[in-house]
């Protein structure tokens, strides 16, 4: 049972590309880290993304590297300023989703799942990196989420 959260790769500026697709560096870093994830055998079953060009491009690179047979899915409710609570309520901890999204949504989601507050910063994402959250059943029967590991293109 895990949830794999990925901030999209480094994107182009809006002036360069109004759709803000991945930059060459964003493509390179995602292409470098995705096979590492494959080598570790992370058990992703489905990759979902926001539908924004930079998230879709990042998701495609991970999808190819992880050799998934399930199709990529676009989902709503994970845009940068969306409220994390509705999305958190629909997470199935057994689904092993990889969610490719945006800041500040991703950081706020990690905070909310692990502390119950969107405002407490628990982790600072890197573009193209993965944050793995796992959970156990809490005393009240609800999922008790915790940060299990991270995998990032840069260690600085």
Image: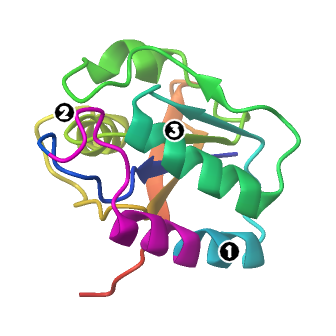
Check whether the beta carbons of the residues at disc 2 and disc 3 lie within 8 A of each other: no
x and y percent of residue 13 in the render?
16, 49
Res. 118 mark: 2
Res. 68 mark: none
In this rendering, the label closer to the viewer, 1 or 3: 3
Residue drawn at x 43%, y 19% as measured from the top left: 87
In this rendering, the label closer to the viewer, 2 or 3: 3
> Looking at the rendering, in which quadrant would you find the C terminus?
bottom left
Res. 56 mark: 3
Q: Which residue is mark 1?
A: 35
> Looking at the rendering, in which quadrant would you find the N terminus?
top right
Asked if 98 appears above or below 90 in the picture, the reply is below
Q: Which residues are magenta?
A: 16-32
| Of the pair 70 and 94, the residue shown nearer to us | 70
Label 3 element class: helix
| Of the pair 111 and 21, the residue shown nearer to us | 21
x and y percent of residue 54 in the render?
39, 43
Q: Is residue 79 left or right of residue 49?
A: left
Q: CA distance from mark 2 to mark 1?
A: 31 Å
Label 1 element class: helix
Crowdedness of circle 2 by 10 Å Cα count: few (<14), some, many (20+)? Answer: many
Q: CA distance from mark 1 to mark 3?
A: 17 Å
x and y percent of residue 65 in the render?
73, 63
């Amino acid at each position: 049972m895990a949830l794999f959260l990925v901030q999209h790769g480094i994107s182009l500026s809006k002036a360069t590309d109004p759709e803000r697709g991945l930059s060459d560096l964003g493509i390179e870093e995602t292409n470098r880290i995705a096979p590492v994830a494959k080598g570790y055998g992370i058990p992703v079953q489905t990759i979902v993304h926001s539908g924004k060009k930079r998230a879709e491009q990042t998701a495609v690179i991970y999808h190819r590297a992880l050799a998934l047979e399930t199709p990529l899915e676009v989902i709503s409710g994970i845009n940068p300023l969306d409220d994390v609570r509705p999305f958190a309520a629909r997470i199935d901890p057994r689904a092993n989703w990889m969610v490719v999204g945006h800041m500040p949504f991703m950081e706020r989601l990690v905070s909310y799942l692990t502390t119950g507050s969107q405002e407490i910063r628990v982790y600072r994402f890197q573009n193209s990196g993965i944050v793995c959250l796992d959970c156990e059943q809490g005393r009240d029967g609800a999922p008790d989420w915790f940060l299990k590991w991270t995998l990032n293109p840069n260690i600085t």
